[in-house]
Image (cartoon, grey):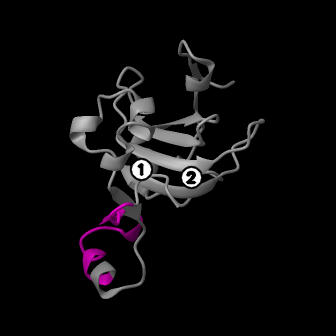
Amino acid sequence: EIERQASTSAQLHLELLDTGSDGACQPWGDQLPARLRLMHSHWLNRDHGVILLRPRPFFERNVQFLIRTSVPKGPGVSTSFYGCWKVPLHLQPLQWMQLITSRRSELTDQLILPTDSFICSVLSKMEALPFIHAYIRAEEGKECGSE
């Protein structure tokens, strides 16, 4: 059974994605850092190709991360990620459609996964590698969802 969150517009329907019994988000989100897999609920809108990461309690709807993706229109959730952006605190209460339209230029912190580097080896002494992630600033003129 799919949990849906309805809106007045058919294009704004969200589907709650199943993270699996182990929280691994297989196969659609296995590249996400553990904190984003385990500490958030994941809501898919197929029409706009976005996955919204919100706090786990159902009534908390602030979007904390936004993933741009290509999603098939039919059943199944096999996706190709374009990127994951941290939503700044002052934008989190906004309706998610505003984040991908009129406010998308303000989503400038793109999530990157750690690589085998000296910095990661130092950080891994304090935190397990699956929990480490970082952000890069979008280049001038390049914003969330632009190629």
Residue nearest the observer in this picture, 146 or 3: 146
Q: What segment is highlighted magenta in the picture?
A: 121-141
Q: Position of residue 73 (x, y in %)?
A: 74, 37
Residue 29: mark = 2
Residue occupied by mark 1? 36
Query: Distance from label 1 to label 2 (Cα)?
Result: 9 Å
Find the residue positioned furthest to the front. 141
Residue nearest the observer in this picture, 28 or 142: 142
SS under mark 2: loop
Q: In which quarter of the image is the N terminus?
A: top right
The residue that appears at 53% across and 15% down in the rendered structure is 7
Q: Where is residue 20 in the image (x, y as percent from the top left)?
A: 60, 43
SS under mark 1: helix
Inspect the image, locate mark 1, and give the three-letter code of the amino acid beneath it.
Answer: Leu
As drawn, 54 above or below 27:
above
Q: Given contact means CB atoms under 8 Å apart, are the residues at marks 1 and 2 in contact?
A: yes
Inspect the image, locate mark 2, and give the three-letter code of the amino acid beneath it.
Answer: Gly
Q: Where is residue 97 in the image (x, y as percent from the top left)?
A: 45, 31
Quarter occupied by residue 142: bottom left
Find the residue positioned furthest to the top. 8
